[in-house]
Amino acid sequence: MGRLVVWVITLLIAAATSEVCHAQVFLASRPNPEFMIGPLFVRATVTPETEVVTLDVLWSLTIPPNMVGAAVEQDLYLLWPNAVDGDSSPGAADPALAAYVKGRGFTPIAEGRLPLLAKSLYRIGEELPPEPIKGGAPFVTFVRQGGPLGLTGPVTYVRIPWTPLLANRTWQMNLRMELTDLMKRRKATWIEDLFWGPQHTISLTFNDVRARALFPVYFERRDRVVRLADDPSQLLVNLTDADHLKIYEFYPGSARRRLSETLDSTEEITLFLDSSEGINPQVLTVQFGYFRGMRSWAPVLIPIAFFALGNLAMPIVMSIVRRASAALKGRVQFGPGGAERETGVVLSRETLARIVPGVTTAEEVLRYCGPDAEEHEQLTAPGRRTLIYRGRRVAPQGRRALGWLATISRWSVEQHEVEVTLDGNVVSDVQARVRRSPLAAPGAASAS
């Protein structure tokens, strides 16, 4: 517990002295270096064929005009907040690096040498390849096991051997790393992966000494930090195959997106580094995805597919809905009142009982039954005519009601026909006929 408190106090002291330290990720061999790093470019190159990211750290040294290169001759060190893997330069590892981290309670997990190159700034037009520095840059990747907070993440300590080209402003140094954990796949649903393909996120950082295994090394050697010069320095992410690239977002908003001026079909996201930020980490994050094959046509094919499916499915869906609605109406009723439905003129028994042959007149028949009647005249019998009333009643059978909700087991349709024969102006005969038949649903009666 006491050790944890010591580290917390150490972190607070580092934050309080950030304006003095101007901590970067480069360290010198001797305290209080008078030279600076600049310009500096941390460049990640992403290709759709592989998840291995090529990272290039390119820089030059800014030496005061009153000093010569021989006066600042010394090895440089780079603190990298992750593990490094991929291609390495031939040669044995540097045992001094492993001994240094072991002496401070860390555990080395990987050793080797990284490619170290030098590029002339005034011979770019001649297409000369960068010159490799013999032996490369030895490194050690280490973790801390145990301790109050448990196992730490892996970090890397790189030694950059001195070469006269470091002091030559016409040359730019290039430390190259192949990284497999710099690009992370974004979690997404299977629908997103199906239509838009996998999405990835890549983040580049500078001034990031917050890793628990890295901070003790920085804090011990904070007096050897090489400051960042005022030269324009940048974090860059190059995304190749721009024709099949979708950039969803990038952070911070001050970053700039454009097509590369020197590389074919490459999107370039850049963030200028602020030398006044001290030990505050500066981060560039890009979320992107590549699409190929049918996914290239997804913005066009998906709306067309939904339109076609909608038009094909609409008749089927409407037919199913109509049938389901008819079946529901035929078996369930909601609301007050009965479920009988009448069309035309349906005369009740009480109305028919009021029509008495030889007594009831034609005016009384029209008053009792209404004027909606067919009238037939017999030419062979002058003065005799017939009034015909026709109607239809759809009636439920086996109705069970609970409040406003009722269920119906079956339906029947009744065809009503009443003939009233008149001799002169008086009823001479009355005939009533009713035909009943089963019905599947009340809508069928309207269609018949």
Image (tube, rainbow, N blue to C red):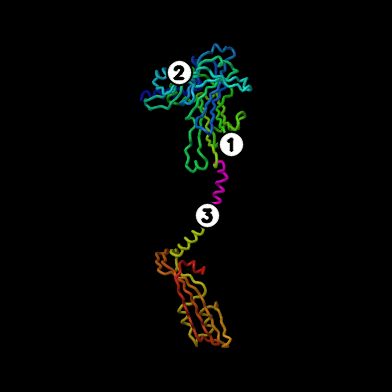
Q: Indicate whether residue 373 is drawn in magenta.
A: no
Number of numbered labels in the structure image = 3
357 shown above or below 321: below
Disc with the residue nearer the chain's start (3 vs 1): 1
Residue 207 image offset from top left, x and y in percent: 50, 25
Q: Residue at x 45, y 18 (%)?
A: 92
Is there any visible trace of residue 293 in the rendered image? yes
Measured in 3D between alpha carbons, the distance from the residue under mark 3 to the one under mark 1, in whole angstroms, is: 36 Å
Point 50% across, 34% down: residue: 201
Q: Are marks 3 and 1 in contact (CB under 8 Å)?
A: no
Secondary structure at numbered mark 1: helix
Q: Which residue is mark 2?
A: 92
- Magenta stretch? 295-313
Q: Calculate the distance from the C-alpha at mark 1 to the C-alpha at mark 2.
A: 43 Å
Residue 212: x and y in percent read 43, 25
What secondary structure characterizes most of the magenta part?
A: helix
Q: Are marks 1 and 2 in contact (CB under 8 Å)?
A: no
For the point 56% across and 24% down, the residue is 41
Q: Residue 273, image x and y in percent?
A: 55, 26
The amino acid at mark 3 is Ala
In the figure, residue 272 lies in which quadrant? top right
Q: Tell me if I can see residue 81 in this picture.
A: no
Residue identified by numbered label 1: 243
Disc 3 packing (10 Å; few <14; some 14–19; many ≥20): few
Observer-side mark, 1 or 2, equals 2
Q: Tag 2, which secondary structure?
A: loop
Q: Is residue 418 above or below residue 306?
A: below
Residue position for label 3: 313
State the residue at coordinates (51%, 72%). Answer: 343
Within 10 Å of disc 1 (Cα), the crowding (few <14, some 14-19, many 20+) is few
Local SS, label 3: helix
Question: Residue type at mark 1?
Answer: Asp
